[in-house]
Image (cartoon, helix red, strand yellow):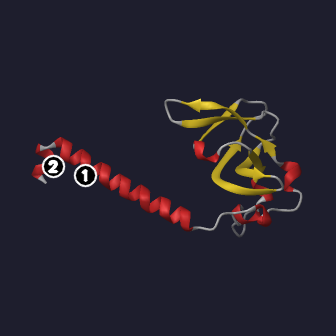
């Protein structure tokens, strides 16, 4: 281990390699899971979906900035990519905690447009089961 202390560049390369490997393992695990599609949504989910407005790309982060409509009621939401009457859940959840507050999401540009917010209650497979004894 003295080698790593004497050569800080080598330790940075080693740590970066370990971080990249951990990221690849996490990405492959996420890619192996089946995507949640609108076939698994509750009936009438389309009436609860609200569009997210793309503001533009953030050059500092390389992500797209989306405005969350201030008319969304408080609660937990999931982002879906919609294509007509079908949709696929993007692995991103967010909460609206106050009425009328400006809120923005920063998402990867690979998703493109037509992103919408759907309440988590409309996606039963994402709802966490209640613990016994708690209401």
Answer with mark 2 or mark 1, whichever residue precedes in sequence.
2
**Residue 38 numbered tag:** none
Disc ID at residue 4: 2
**Is residue 3 shown left or right of residue 57?**
left
- Report crowding for label 1: few under 14, some 14 to 19, many 20 or more residues within 10 A (C-alpha): few
Q: Are marks 2 and 1 in contact (CB under 8 Å)?
A: yes
Q: Residue at x 71, y 51 (%)?
A: 81
Q: Which of the 4 quarters of the picture holds residue 127?
A: bottom right
Task: From the viewer's side, name the closer residue of 24 and 124.
Answer: 24
Secondary structure of the residue carrying tag 1 is helix
Q: Where is residue 108 in the image (x, y as percent from the top left)?
A: 57, 44
- Cα gap from disc 2 to disc 1, whole angstroms: 9 Å
- Image point 43% across, 55% down: which residue? 23
x 70%, y 42%: residue: 113
Q: Which residue occupies the foreground of this view, 60 or 129? A: 60
| Neighbours of disc 2 within 10 Å: few (<14), some (14-19), many (20+) | few
Residue 82 % position (x, y): 76, 51
Q: What residue is at 10 percent from the left and 51 percent from the top?
A: 2
Task: Please tell me whether mark 2 sits on a helix, a strand or a loop.
Answer: helix
Quadrant of the image for the N terminus? Answer: bottom left
Disc ID at residue 14: 1
Please state if 61 lies on the left or on the right of 37 as rendered: left
* Relative to 93, residue 104 above or below: above
């Amino acid at each position: 281990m003295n080698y790593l202390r004497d050569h800080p560049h080598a330790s940075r390369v080693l740590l970066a390699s370990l971080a990249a490997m951990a990221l690849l393992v996490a990405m492959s695990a996420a890619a192996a899971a089946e995507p949640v599609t609108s076939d698994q949504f509750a009936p009438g989910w389309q009436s609860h979906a609200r569009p997210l407005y793309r503001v533009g790309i953030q050059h500092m982060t390389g992500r797209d900035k989306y405005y969350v409509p201030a008319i969304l009621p408080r609660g937990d939401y999931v982002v879906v990519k919609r294509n007509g009457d079908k949709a696929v859940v993007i692995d991103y959840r967010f909460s609206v905690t106050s009425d009328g507050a400006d809120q923005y999401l920063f998402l990867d540009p690979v998703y493109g447009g037509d992103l919408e917010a759907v309440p988590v209650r409309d996606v039963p497979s994402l709802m966490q089961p209640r613990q016994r004894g708690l209401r």
